[in-house]
Image (cartoon, rainbow, N blue to C red):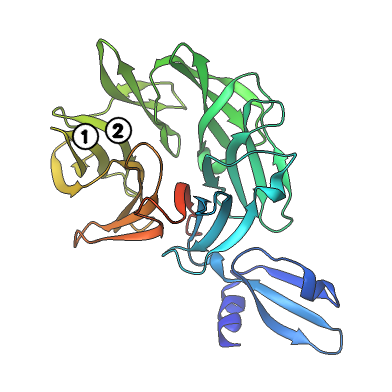
Amino acid sequence: YQRWEELRSQDRYRQYHLWGEDAVTTRLPPGVVAGGHDQDNDEIVFYERELLVPRLASVLILDDGGWSLVVSDANGANPVPVFTEEDVTGLSGIPTYVRWTPSSDALLYIAGSMAGGREIFEYEMVSKKIRQLTHSDAREEQFELVFGGEEIVAVSSAGGGKFDLALLTREGQFIREVVTGVEDYPYVYAKGNKVFYKEGGGLNPYRWYQLDLLTDERSLVSVPGDGDTIFLALSPDGGFLACSLHRGGAYFVVVLDSETGEEKMSFDVMYPAGWIEWSDDGTSLRWLVSPWGIGYSVTSLNVESGETQTVIGSTKTHGDRAITFAFSPIPK
């Protein structure tokens, strides 16, 4: 039990105590493993080791036509189904966008509601309970957690090809409008109190903006001028900006100096790099491989070596396909 003693000494673990039949029949969250068995009390103590390592949540379209939300190790190993279509019948539809809470004790996701709209839901990892956070007339398309996970920036369809950004409480209650009438899908990225979003389309060129939620100050983001930046993400230290770029009929992942906009690195990729993000340590980039606008797999790129690897999902036209993903944050 050396591993459990290490966790106990660091006071960085969670315990789950189960007795008798419950210890055998209860489905525990992924990553919770047995640490000891008290024969006298018929008690098993479980420890959640993933508090020290990141996990990957993915929604997979299965080869047999069904779907499943799975949680795996960060490298895609040991995938465990969290819930499937049968588990959420009468609650929600398939999750199309997913994010971890900062403490990794819950997953927030967007899915169709029973009322016919699209809403934000929460899945609690330990209790396995699902609850609907938003109950709006708008069609929720995307969201990001801001202010350390205390609030939510939600993107909703405003009709006519326009979108609104609103600030919500962590419980899904409306606080205020942030931006209204954004032309075309904004592909929001958030970090701390900063929100990045894309606007343009038609006769207007695409532009990226950075909005400070504390001051409502808006500024242009310097992105490559010789292509269409589809997604972007700020590095953990704020020094670099990773951009998923469509340039001259080809696709690239480029890394820029976030202050000057100078291109520091460029990597050729076969398909658009969707929902690009940095790892917490800044050594790798992860994105959704999306050949025809539909997610297929999650790919990781080591920014020093330039090596890529498929983390989860299929790069073929068959096999289980990933449509959205989220890496849990490393606890500070």
The residue identified by callout 2 is 230
Q: Residue at x 59, y 41 (%)?
A: 94
| Tag shown at residue 246 | 1
Q: Residue at x 59, y 43 (%)?
A: 108
Q: For the residue labelled by badge 1, is the local secondary structure a helix, a strand or a loop?
A: strand
Name the spot of residue 144 as percent of width and height, x first: 50, 37
The quarter of the rendered structure image containing the N terminus is: bottom right
Judge whether residue 259 can be spotted in this image. Answer: no
Q: Image check: 220 left or right of 82?
A: left
Q: Nearer the viewer, residue 290 or 327?
A: 290
Image quadrant in which you'd find residue 90: top right
Q: Image check: 89 left or right of 265?
A: right
Q: Residue at x 66, y 30 (%)?
A: 134
Q: Residue at x 70, y 84 (%)?
A: 36
- Numbered circles on residues, count: 2
CB within 8 Å, label 2 to label 1:
yes
Image quadrant in which you'd find residue 227: top left
Disc 2 marks a residue whose amino acid type is Ile
| Label 2 vs 1, first from the N-terminus | 2
Q: CA distance from mark 2 to mark 1?
A: 7 Å
